[in-house]
Each structure stands twice: as structure tokens, then as C-alpha cells.
Amino acid sequence: MNADKDGRAGVAAGDDGYEEVQGVLVARDADGAWRYRPRAPGLARGGDGRAQFSLIAAGPVTMLALTASWGVPAATLDAVRADLAARAQLPPAQLSLSPEPVQVGTVRLMLGDGAGGFEELAKTQSSGAPPYHAALNLMLSAEQAAKVRKALGGERGWLELRYETLDAPAVRRASSAQTEQSLSVEAALRDAQGEAGLRAQLRYGEKIETDSGGGEPRARSYSGDAADWGLPKP
């Protein structure tokens, strides 16, 4: 199984036919339909547009609660669709654009050291469907809280969300070819009345099957730094 890790995302533009449009990774299928993947995870937002995130100090500890999301806002998808439709000279309503079928595994909240090193702070499972929400609630020590506040202040490398995904298995296509051969055999048998001829025909065949299957699905890791979550500075 292959694994991709690319800092912010597991698929870079140009990888597996992907390109980036309006900050979203898109690829075109052979039938002309388009599929997309989010560039990086972030925070889910409520109906009022506010990020689902809270950091509350309570004496010597700090409570952190957030809901992670790996999706694309509807307005951004509309912009992507419009760009692709203009390229194809089609009305946007006629352009097929759908999420890439993937399996989302563990969602991790990672605490960094500001120099590229990270350790797991908490983990959970996603909702299993786009935009793959995942709720995380935990208590922070004073040292951990100080690092989180650096991240909220806009410094990179202190806090990130990481989604682990597995591509949907490629469709396997099998084909077969069958050949048939015949073999004639003549034999002479002698009995009491004389010689009699015997003719027999044997048939044999061979069936060859080939498989153009796509091999093992690829594991990928998508990361989003807290500096890109769009949170107001503390």
C-alpha cells in the first residue's frame, strides 16, 4: 500500500491527473465527468458562519473543543463548477462535479514544536460522509495550551488537523478468451469376424483469463495548519 504525505495535503496538483481550481483539487474522468477533493482539512462552521471551536481556561487546565471538517463550501464548489464549465464551453448545470469516493479513517489533532515536529494530541473517527465532520474534546496542560495559543496567534507548526484517507478500490475489469482444438484418432481392431475400423475425435480447449485490476488502494494524509483555519486572533 502506498502512502502520500505532502505537508498540507496528500495529493499535489498534477498527481494522478489532479489540478487545483479555486483552491480545490479536481480531476477529469474518461467519460468527461469531474471529481474533486478538498485541499486540506479545517473547521466546521455553524449556520451563522462561525467556526466550531472553543478554548476555555479553567484554573490550571484549559478545555479545547472543536469540530473538524474535510469538505468544500457550496459557494466554492459553484465557483469551481463555473470555471470548469467555461473551459468546456458548457452551461454550469450540465457539468458533472462530484466528491472523489474515498474512505476516511482516523482524524488526528497534532501538537507541534514550531520546527516541523508533531505529536498526537487527540484522535477520533469522522462522520463517514462528506464533509467528514469529526468532534474533538480534550483537556490541555498549561504547556500544551501555550502552544495552542501560539497557533491561534497565526504561527505555523504548532497545531494541525490530519485526515487519513484511503482511495476507493479501482474497478477491476476481467476478460477471457477461449480456444478449442480437435484431434482425430484412427485405430484398427481385429475381432473374430475380421478387421473393423474405429475412428474417434477428441476435443480439448483452453481458457485464458486476464485481469486489468487497479491494484491496492492508495492511503493518503491531508493536513491543515491552524493558521489556515480562519479563526480570529486572540
Image (tube, rainbow, N blue to C red):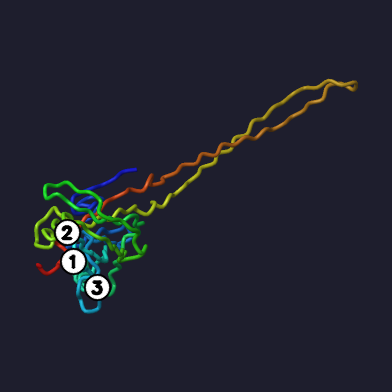
Instruction: Tell how many labels.
Output: 3
171, 73: nearer the viewer: 73
Q: Which numbered disc, 1 or 3, marks the residue closer to the eye?
A: 1
Q: Position of residue 85 (x, y in %)?
A: 22, 69
**Neighbourhood count class around disc 3 (C-alpha, 10 Å): few under 14, some 14–19, many 20 upward:** few
186, 97: nearer the viewer: 97
Secondary structure beneath label 2: helix
Q: Quadrant of the N terminus?
A: top left
Q: Which numbered disc, 1 or 2, marks the residue closer to the eye?
A: 1
Type of amino acid at the residue the image marks with label 3: Ala
Query: Mark 1 vs mark 3: which is more N-terminal?
Result: 1
Type of amino acid at the residue the image marks with label 2: Ala
Residue at mark 2: 145
State how far apart marks 1 and 2 are (Cα): 9 Å
Q: Residue at x 14, y 67 (%)?
A: 230
State how far apart marks 1 and 3 are (Cα): 34 Å
Residue 185 to residue 171: above or below: above
165, 111: nearer the viewer: 111
Q: Position of residue 198 (x, y in %)?
A: 77, 28
Q: Quadrant of residue 18?
A: bottom left
State how far apart marks 3 and 2 are (Cα): 33 Å
Q: Quadrant of residue 45?
A: bottom left
Residue at mark 1: 57
- Left or right: 179 in relation to 136: right
Type of amino acid at the residue the image marks with label 1: Ala
* Residue 74 numbered tag: 3
Query: Mark 3 vs mark 2: which is more N-terminal?
Result: 3
Contact check, label 1 and label 2, Cβ < 8 Å: yes
Contact check, label 3 and label 2, Cβ < 8 Å: no
